[in-house]
Image (cartoon, rainbow, N blue to C red):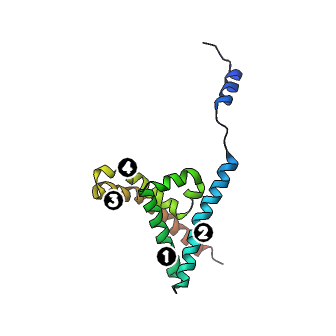
Amino acid sequence: MDNFNKKEYREFANKKVPKPTYMRNIIFAFIVGGIICTIGEWLNNYLAKLGYNQSSIDSCTSIILIFLGSLLTGLGVYDKIGKVGGAGAAIPITGFANSIVAPAMEFKREGFIFGVAAKMFIIAGPVLVYGVGSSIIVGLLTILFKK
């Protein structure tokens, strides 16, 4: 076996490491995130056309997007979207739904009640605690430093 010195090894390793495709990743993240946001805007416009008020529109849009993200995760489709879209699929609210449902799906063989449903709430717990906690802190800071 050949003995490499550090410089030769670094050159050898650099030849073997795949080159990152930053521009491709950026473009696909932009496209996938744009499609998800376009679906959200379409839902907003559709619900407005049906005569809902803005508060209801906002709530319904969030609920529908979370449901779609969860459903697509359960069907195994959202993982494929995430592979292509990267951060464009992870950042919108559908990515939040995916991050809650995906780990719970690993417990599918234990049943849907004691496996998936129980583990989903175990996983969601810390997310909800930190989300509520940080929103309280932001609210208090807003009240304290309000002009």
Which type of secondary structure does the marked residue at label 1 adopt? helix
Q: Which residue is mark 1?
A: 59
Other residues around mark 3 within 10 Å, as few (<14) / some (14–19) / many (≥20): some
Disc 1 and disc 4 in contact, CB within 8 angstroms = no
What's under tag 3, amino acid-wise? Answer: Ala
Q: Is residue 34 above or below residue 77?
A: below
Secondary structure under the numbered disc 3 in the rendered image: helix
Q: Which residue is mark 3?
A: 117
Between discs 2 and 3, the one toward the N terminus: 2
Type of amino acid at the residue the image marks with label 4: Glu
Residue at the spot x=66%, y=41% of the render?
20
Pinpoint residue 52: horizontal percent, then vertical percent: 51, 85
Q: Please tell me which of labels 4 and 3 falls first in the chain.
A: 4
Earlier in the chain: of badge 2 and badge 1, it is: 2
Vertical arrangement, residue 50 with respect to residue 31, above or below: below
- Callout 2 amino acid: Thr
Q: Position of residue 68 (x, y in %)?
A: 47, 65
Q: Is residue 101 left or right of residue 138?
A: left
Q: Which residue is mark 4?
A: 106
Callout 2 secondary element: helix
Crowding near the residue tagged with mark 4, few <14, some 14–19, many ≥20 C-alpha atoms within 10 Å: few
> In whole angstroms, how far apart are the C-alphas of marks 4 and 3?
11 Å
Q: Residue at x 47, y 71 (%)?
A: 64
Cα distance, mark 4 to mark 2?
Answer: 31 Å
How many other residues sit within 10 Å of disc 1, few (<14), some (14-19) or many (≥20)? few
Which image quarter is the C terminus in?
bottom right
Mark closest to the chain's N terminus, 1 or 3: 1
Residue on which the image places disc 2 = 38
